[in-house]
Image (cartoon, helix red, strand yellow):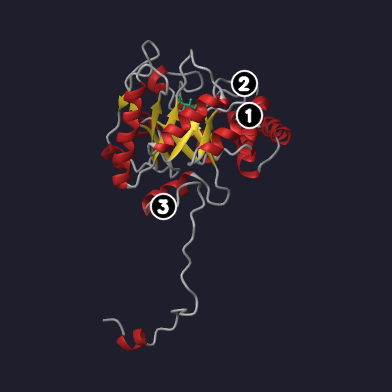
């Protein structure tokens, strides 16, 4: 039985201090429910408001991508340096130990291979399985201007509806067809449509001209994909510019796992994202770490 007298006399009510109603640190996310916010706060570091997501989901449409042939050998050692891991449920269940406590973003769309029309996707993971896997977000490809544009948008809105029931955010991944212009105008259109229709955050590509208008016009956080492998300094420069121009992080794959030294590269990317380190300084860090790791 609780001590009734003690309760009456309880001391720490701080009646002179009103409870704070804090805003949430993440762009556009203040009105979500607790579980949704908590998952987002695991993906995005509340201290910096940013994230380094390691993207290794490429196999869902292109099989054993260069650098991802043996995820158990080459990728597991990178996990401690990532804020978040983005991958398919197949790789999660078969290769990633359940003792890994990093937040998981599960690839939740699929249905086409590189041999066919890529925009012809459907939702490929049930929300119940996402819950079973304890994921922090579900990722869906959205093909604005693509052959199956409408279907991919509806995939996204259905995931948003299912995820919202259980407090699981949806990451909309803007996919660009080969024949489409990768410019700020296109990405403003694509990212804004995703956010308007409910995506909790959006992945897109960096463009040199006008990227700040893409982030400004999108009411939810944007993370950038790395794209094809480029020299390390160039990739760090791209990440730096994206962050300075309003991105909330990276969801980077090939420019990390196809690097000469993936462990060094992911740490250099972290310095750019979380410490706003310049590309030159981050590249120095990359070279130092690469050298040290080569001695081991
Ligand atoms: C591509 O469809 C996958 O979703 C990747 O997660 C995405 O492209 C990011 O990887 P990368 O940095 O290699 O472009």
Viewer-side residue, 189 vs 76: 189
Q: Position of residue 100 (x, y in %)?
A: 43, 42
Single out the mark in the foreground, 3 or 1. 3
The residue identified by callout 2 is 230
The residue identified by callout 1 is 238
First in residue order: circle 2 vs circle 1: 2
Viewer-side residue, 137 vs 180: 180
Quadrant of the rendered image containing residue 294? top right
Badge 3 marks a residue whose secondary structure is loop
Viewer-side residue, 66 vs 62: 62
Quadrant of the rendered image containing residue 101? top left
Does residue 63 show up? no
Q: Position of residue 114 (x, y in %)?
A: 40, 13
Instruction: Rate crowding at label 3 as few (under 14), some (14 to 19) or many (20 or more) other CA atoms within 10 Å.
Output: few
In the rendered view, tell whether residue 51 sits above or below residue 6: above
Q: Position of residue 215 (x, y in %)?
A: 55, 36
The residue identified by callout 3 is 31
């Amino acid at each position: 039985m609780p001590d009734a007298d003690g309760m009456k006399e309880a001391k720490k009510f701080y009646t002179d201090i009103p409870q704070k109603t804090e805003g949430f640190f993440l762009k556009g996310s203040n009105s979500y429910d607790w579980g949704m916010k908590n998952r987002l706060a695991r993906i995005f570091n509340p201290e910096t408001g940013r994230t380094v997501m390691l993207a290794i989901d490429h196999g869902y449409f292109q099989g054993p991508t260069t650098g991802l042939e043996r995820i158990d050998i080459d990728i597991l050692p990178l996990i401690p340096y990532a804020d978040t891991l983005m991958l398919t449920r197949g790789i999660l269940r078969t290769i990633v130990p359940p003792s890994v406590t990093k937040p998981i973003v599960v690839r939740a769309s699929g249905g086409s291979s590189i041999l066919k029309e890529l925009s012809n996707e459907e939702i490929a993971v049930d929300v119940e399985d996402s819950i079973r896997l304890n994921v922090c977000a579900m990722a869906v490809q959205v093909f604005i201007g693509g052959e199956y544009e409408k279907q991919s948008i509806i995939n996204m809105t259905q995931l948003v509806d299912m995820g919202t029931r259980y407090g699981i955010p949806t990451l909309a991944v803007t996919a660009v067809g080969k024949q489409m212009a990768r410019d700020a105008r296109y990405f403003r259109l694509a990212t804004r449509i995703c956010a308007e229709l409910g995506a909790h955050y959006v992945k897109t590509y960096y463009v040199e001209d006008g990227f700040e208008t893409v982030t400004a016009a999108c009411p939810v956080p944007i993370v950038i994909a790395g794209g094809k492998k480029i020299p390390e300094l160039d990739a760090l420069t791209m990440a730096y510019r994206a962050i300075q121009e309003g991105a909330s992080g990276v969801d980077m794959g090939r420019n990390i796992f196809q690097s000469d030294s993936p462990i060094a590269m992911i740490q250099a990317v972290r310095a750019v994202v979380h410490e706003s380190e310049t590309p030159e300084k981050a590249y120095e860090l990359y070279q130092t770490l690469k050298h040290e790791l080569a001695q081991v």
